Structures are given as C-alpha cells and as structure tokens.
Image (cartoon, rainbow, N blue to C red):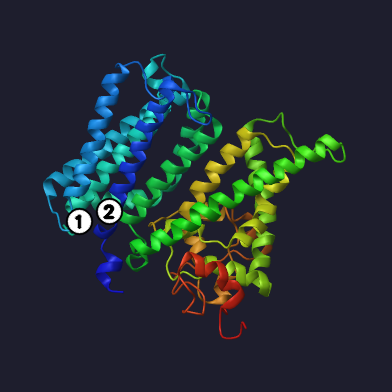
Amino acid sequence: MNETQNGDCSQLLRPILVALSFIFSLRIIAQYLQLNRDLDGLPRFDLWHTDTMPYPVLLGLQILIFLTMLTVTWAVSPNTRRPRLGRALKIAAFVYALVMFLRMVVGFLELSSSSWFDGAVSSAFHFILAAFLLTLGTLLTAEEPSTFWEHLARKIAAVAAYPILIISGFTMYVWLRDTGAPLLFSSYLSALLGLVGIILHETLAPARKDWRPLLKEVVQDGLFVAFVQIGVPVTLKALTLAILVGVSQSEVVAITGFWPHEAPILVQIMLMLVVAEFFRYWIHRALHVYGPLWRLHAVHHASDKLYTINVGRFHPFDKAIQFLGDTAPFLLLGVSPEVFGTYFVLYAINGFYQHSNAEVKLGPLNYIIAGPELHRWHHSAKISEANSNYGNNLIIWDTIFGTRYLPADREVGRVGIENRNWPNSFRAQLMAPFTTPTDATDK
C-alpha cells in the first residue's frame, strides 16, 4: 500500500460526494412519497418544507440541485484542480452552514414566530448541501499549499469541532422532535449529520495520514455498521420488548419504581450515561482479559488503522454481549423513548468521534470524555497499553478503577493485534474468532 493511496485525501472525496448526493436524493423521495400517503416513521408532508414557496416549484428546484450534484460528481476527478473556485466554494460552504446553524438555534430556542424557523427537516438537508460544497471545494484545491486561514481553521477545528458537533446533534434531535418529526427519524438523522461532519473533519484534518482508509476498507467496515452496529441492537431491542410484553401480560415480573421517570430528560440522560458506562466498563474489561471473549472482541481491534467507519467493526456475539450492559437494563426499567433517543444521538456521535482519525484536542475534557486521544491508546498493539481506557462515552470509571492512560510525551504507535494475517473481509471476520489465533500464543 503506497503513500498516495494512504495519504491523499482526494482519493476519498469523490466517494463522499456520491454519498452526499444519495442522502439528498432521499429527502426528495421521502417528501414526494408523503404527498399522497402517510408513511409511518417519516415526518408528515408539511414538515419537509416551509411555506416560502409552492411545493411544485420546490420539487423542481430540488431535482435541479440533485442533477447538478450528480453532474459535478461525475465531471470532477481526483486530478481536477481549480484552486480559486475551490476556495470560494469552501467559504460559501462555511457561510451556508453558519446560516443553517443560526436557523437551528433560533428554531430550537423558539426565538421567532416565523415559520422558516420551524424547518427542522429541511435545515438538516441544507447541512448536507453545505457539506457537499465543502467537499467539492476541498477536492478542487487538493495538493494546493494551505493558506494561513486554512491552517487556522484546522487548529480551531481540533479544539472546537467535537463539542460543536455533539451540541449540534443534540440540538437538531430536539428541534426535529419538537417540530413533529418521529423519534426514530429524528435520532437517526441527527446522528447521520454528526457522522458526515466527523468524516469531513478526519478527511480534511487527519491525526495520521497513514490511517486514511482505502475505499474497499470502507465498504467492508460499512457492512459491519449496517448489519452489526445497527442491525443487531435493533433486533435485540425488538426481542427484548416482545419478551417484556409477554412477561407483563403474564404478570410474572414488573420492574417499577427504580427509574426517576419524572426527572428532567437531561437528568435522566446523565444518569443513564453514568450507569450504562459502569456496566459497559466491566463488560469491556472482561472482553479483554478473558480469552474466549477476547477472540470475539479481536474483530474490533484487528484493524491496523483507526477511522470513523470502522467503529462498527464488531462480531455480532460481541455486540450482543455489550447490549446487555448499555441497553437491556434500561428497557427493563421502562426508560422512555425520548430518553433513549437522546442517549442514542450522544452515544452515536461520540462513538464515531472516539474512533475517528480526526485531529482532536480535548484538553481538560479528557478527564471526563472517552474521546479519540484516549481511545487510540486502547487500540495499541501493545497489550500493556491497550488494556486501558475502556470507557465508551465517559472516562470516569477508568479514572476510579485505575485504567485511564494518556501519556503526555508521546503518541500511540502501531495499532491492531499481534496477528497481522487476520482476515479483512466481512464474512471471514465473522468466522475468525473460531478459526484464527489473535497472536502467537492464542491457539
């Protein structure tokens, strides 16, 4: 694998343009479907746009935008260079995103009676368009010397991007929910916007260029995200709820009185984070020190690079075990869907960031948040370094139990497991814990 494949971000930008175009197309399709039918799980037709223009005009404009996105994506290549246009597009993207951010804040705080500030769903997709402009502008200026302002933006992003994306994800979720969008739609769309922001951050300002993935690696790890990171918890949650319904109907067990349902949602979220982290800490620690469990968990650690999408690289059995700590107890306690939705958004965005290759400097927050600077040491190929920083969202239990590890004088070296011949394909990794040793002594 050569340096060009690993270090040149322009190889990744065109696939990002394709993905953003696809996401925007979903907005057109979903709203059109809601015009003549009311599909469960999607916002009502009137929530997809404000009354600033008639829908036929809006639909025509959206189709024109989508076709332009496709044309531009097809026309440009990693070798296309238009520095002046690229920098103009990046400035336009920043202004565009800032306007939408202010719209979100005003709408969230209900500071205006204008219907434009009720457009939570449309604003979410305006962020997608801003991301498209930023990606296109970066592709057109790739390999050009960075300006003073671009260096400054990178330094600011290292400190500010993490809290901004976490707060924005939470704000977007609440704004979508409060304006009438379904909970599941609100939580997944908010997490998706956070994911887009994180991928752009790590692509434009990577912590390590040799951790930039190849497209085939992204595809393999994307399968884990779809089938394991999303599919397994959804399936287990449905099964758990079905069991709970059966149990409650038989009046055998009723777990009540143990959760402060009347407390403010933010209080419930903080309590859920702290309690879930306690269970996850000990489960995660067991996955590292108990041989059979480690072989399952090695699927997650086998990659020799860290980037956002391979956060989902888990064996289904490993994910099921973790479900017992971070979801099942709260289903049993009857935690409300609103609390679960908010927890999911914070959990997802932090999880994506924790695993990302973005240049991040959290400073004092590293004593509270289990962020990327800490988590990279958890993926060290040295066992003495990897058996640390077990926290998923918070680092407090590692601090209490003495496993927090963040040297100030150096960065992590090689990451992964000792066996460098661990398979890479999705299907092979599902069987690897039962057929392949993780190191020379693991038979």
Closer mark to the observer between disc 1 and disc 2: 2
Indicate which disc residue 254 carries.
Answer: none
Q: Position of residue 199 (x, y in %)?
A: 37, 52
Q: Secondary structure at mark 2?
A: helix
- Residue at left 69%, top 37%? 335
* 193 is higher (above) or lower (below) than 79: above
Q: Position of residue 253 (x, y in %)?
A: 85, 41
Which one is in front, 188 or 232?
232
* Quadrant assignment for the C terminus: bottom right
Q: Which residue is mark 1?
A: 142
Marks 1 and 2 in Cβ contact (< 8 Å): yes
Q: Secondary structure at mark 1?
A: loop
- Specify whether residue 144 is in view: yes
* 298 is higher (above) or lower (below) than 121: below
Q: Which residue is mark 2?
A: 13
* Quadrant assignment for the N terminus: bottom left
Judged left or right of residue 349, residue 321 is right
* 229 is higher (above) or lower (below) than 269: below
Please name the amino acid that badge 1 sits on.
Ala
* Disc 1 packing (10 Å; few <14; some 14–19; many ≥20): many
- Residue at left 61%, top 72%? 295
Judged left or right of residue 11, residue 423 is right
Q: Position of residue 112 (x, y in %)?
A: 41, 16
Please name the amino acid that badge 2 sits on.
Leu
- Residue at left 29%, top 38%? 130
Q: Position of residue 304 (x, y in %)?
A: 44, 71
